[in-house]
Image (cartoon, grey):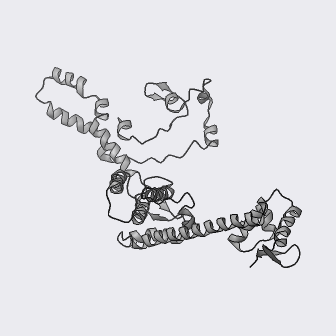
Amino acid sequence: MFEELLVNAFLFGLTGTPINKRDRNTFWAFGADEDEQGYMSRYSFQDSIRDKATLPLHFEAVDVKLHINKDAIDEVYSQMTDQLSEEDRDDLVKRAAKMAVLIKAPARVNAICQHIVGRIQNYVVNSGTGQVIYTPHTAVEVPVMMSELVKWLNADLDIHPLLVSGIAQFQLVHIHPFLDGNGRASRLLSTLCLYKAGYDFKRLFTISEYYDRDRPTFYRSIQSVRDNGMDMTGWLDCFVTGLETQMIEVRERSEQVIRRDVLVNQYGLNQRQGKALGYLLQHGKLTIQDFETLCPTVNRRSLQRDLKGMLDKNLITAEGATNQLIYRLAG
């Protein structure tokens, strides 16, 4: 019954001794068909600790309203069957008053499951200080909120696709449905929204590149929504600015690649010289150490010849002392 109500729950073992009877089948839950020799029977708790398969368990007493008070049940039962004969009462006890029946009563099982789900809580903490910075919604609320988000995304919205993408990213982070990976999932969702709306970036960038440059500002923009009564203006400004910055950089990189290819063909450059030229277009200068990083399997003498060839063609210039030369594009 618990399996039907807690469909996303997973199994974990509470014993180091495999047992094999009815639904208490450790082999069924944790074994493998390939384990013909029964290694599980020899797998010690020391092995489990070594493999980090043994984890601490934290027990919490269930609300007293979910406990079975046998004395109270007996008293109520006595009152309800006061008019029955002793024989009828004994017969009724045998058929309906078994403890197992009471324990497995659907209403009680459902109440326990609701209690368990209600106690499951995820937290967002500061990785440096360990301080809780956001307490997401409870596990009971998450499915409802996710369903509402999906319905909203699938509706015919009179909102610009860029704003829809930004709202979707925030909402998934805000709902926080997963124990880990919510940020990555939210950025994938926002990218999916953009692709569905016709914004095909050809995998030239990911929005994460922009956020990674200034994580504190990104997190402050997310938190500002909650601090301002769910006003998303500040967050959406950050989101759109990030997209704009990334697209400008993609355009600039594309122009650099096109210019590099034109110059490689115009001057007859080899592959290594093409790499050096691409680096110069992106960074403005190049040293022999930079070139060695670009071509780690090539010796310095060969790389120096490549650079001299580019100097002879007046494609680049050099300044500084020997072995400390800085190369730049000519003109």
Question: Visible in this render: residue 297?
Answer: yes
Image-quadrant location for residue 277:
bottom right
From the viewer's perspective, is 241 left or right of 149?
A: right
Residue 115: x and y, percent?
Answer: 34, 47
Q: Residue furthest front?
A: 266
Question: Visible in this render: residue 128?
Answer: no
Looking at the image, which residue is at 23% across and 34% down?
Answer: 74
The front one of 206 and 269 is: 269
Image-quadrant location for residue 41:
top right
Above or below residue 318? Residue 11 is above
Above or below residue 324? Residue 134 is above
The front one of 303 and 238 is: 303
Image-quadrant location for residue 105:
top left
Residue 319: x and y, percent?
Answer: 83, 79
Looking at the image, which residue is at 86% across and 69% down?
Answer: 308
From the viewer's perspective, is 120 left or right of 27?
A: left
Q: Quadrant of the C terminus?
A: bottom right
Above or below residue 256? Residue 27 is above
Looking at the image, which residue is at 64% across and 42% down?
Answer: 50
The front one of 274 and 99 is: 274
Residue 2: x and y, percent?
Answer: 37, 37
Residue 186: x and y, percent?
Answer: 46, 58
